[in-house]
Amino acid sequence: MKKKKIFKIAGVIILVGVIIGSGVAYYLFNMPHRDVQDSKTDFSLSASSIVNEYLQNADSANAKYLQEEGESKILAVKGKIFSISVDQKNQKVVLLKDVSEKAGVSCTFTQETNSHADNLKEGQTVTIKE
């Protein structure tokens, strides 16, 4: 009799745990993505300044520009377009970099925002919010 009572309690606890776990998983899976275009910009800077920060001290730059969860803060990066390409997912990739610089900032547009890069040209100076 005592074993039956223990099994019932354990079964109820397991069932409640599965229901709560399923609810949390459902919520996280269906959570809306962050809308960068409508969000406030955390930093406005040039492509060369962010590259130099990372070349000097990557850990310090990560602490400044990444949130604790690992997502980047919202940046408005200004620079000259060095190249425009398309990746394997058919997303446009704009590289902001001067010819004299060693590295640049790569900005990837999503399928929904690809059209924003249609009128961009190499050599043009732009500000891209990412």
Image (tube, rainbow, N blue to C red):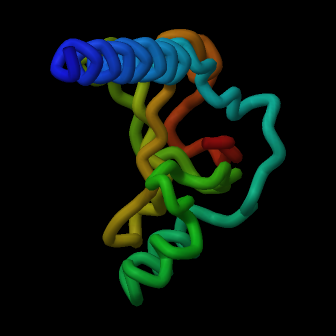
Q: Give the farthest residue toward the front.
A: 1
Percent position (x, y) of residue 82?
A: 44, 47
Residue 57, located in which quarter of the rendered image? bottom left
Q: In the image, 69: left or right of 41?
A: left
Q: Quadrant of the C terminus?
A: top right
Q: Judge whether 90 appears above or below 98 on screen.
A: above
**Quarter residue 95 falls in:** top left
Above or below, comparing residue 114 to residue 105 in the picture = above
Q: Residue furthest bottom?
A: 56
Residue 97 is left or right of residue 45, and the answer is: left
Task: State the quadrant of the N terminus.
Answer: top left
Q: Is residue 114 shown to the viewer in this render?
A: no
Residue 60 visible to an observer of this rendering:
yes
The residue furthest left is 3
| Front-lying residue, 101 or 86 | 86
Residue 60 rendering spot, x and y as whole percentages? 47, 83
The answer to which of 103 and 23 lies nearer the viewer is 23
Report x, y in % for residue 73. 62, 54
Side (left or right) of 101 relative to 11:
right
Q: Nearer the viewer, residue 58 or 34?
A: 34
For image coordinates 47% across by 80% down, the residue present is 52
Q: Residue at x 35, y 65 (%)?
A: 103
| Residue 107 rendering spot, x and y as whole percentages | 48, 41
**Going 49% across and 23% down the picture, which residue do you hit?**
24
Is 84 on the left or on the right of 125, as rendered? left
- In depth, the one of 126 and 23 nearer the eye is 23
Q: How many marks?
A: 0
